[in-house]
Amino acid sequence: MAKLARDVDVIQGAKDSSGDLENLKAYIRLTQDVGKPFSVLAGNDGAILTCLKEGGAGGIAGRANLYPKSLASIYNSFVAGDIAQAEKLQDAVATLQRVFRFGNPNTVIKKAVAMLGYPVGDCRRPFNYLCDEGIAELQAVLKENAEKGLC
């Protein structure tokens, strides 16, 4: 990563979607002094605040399709120095994770967006299915998040 960041001019940053926080931290650490601006972004929505705390630039968040203001507020709260609020928001958006065991995360996000009233359509087959139990859990999470004021 450091070699690519340093030696390839057109590479300006990297997104780590591994879900491995130590991997994310290593990317940040190894690219901080490459001699040019280089951004590391969390591709796992649950790692945005960790990324920021470690010196990363933020995240590319699938859950922002559901809660754009809340996801942006993780970053905004961090930049403003309100770490407690950033942690609260990071924890709040994590509830969707419990639905991912029922299907592809992209399917869950698209189903959730549709349930919120935006007819975005399904993922392509074979990733378009979410079982009845998954739908019920998703409805519960959306209700819970609405009660928390996520938006």
Image (cartoon, rainbow, N blue to C red):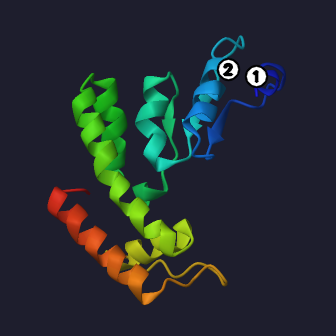
Amino acid type of the residue that numbered disc 1 sits on in the rendered structure? Ala
Q: Position of residue 9 (x, y in %)?
A: 80, 25
Q: Position of residue 84 (x, y in %)?
A: 23, 31
Which residue, given by chain and number where applicable, does mark 1 sit on? Answer: 2
Q: Quadrant of residue 74?
A: top left
Numbered disc 1: secondary structure: helix
**Residue at 68 percent of width and 19 percent of height:** 30
Q: Which mark is residue 34?
A: none
Amino acid type of the residue that numbered disc 2 sits on in the rendered structure? Thr
**Residue at 59 percent of width and 33 percent of height:** 24
Single out the residue that lies furthest toward the left: 147
User: Measured along the vertical axis of the image, is residue 62 above or below residue 55?
Assistant: below
**Relative to 114, is 32 on the left or the right?**
right
For mark 2, does the 10 Å Cα neighbourhood hold few (<14), some (14 to 19), or many (20 or more) residues?
many
- Quarter of the N terminus within the rendering: top right
User: Measured along the vertical axis of the image, is residue 69 above or below residue 3?
Assistant: below
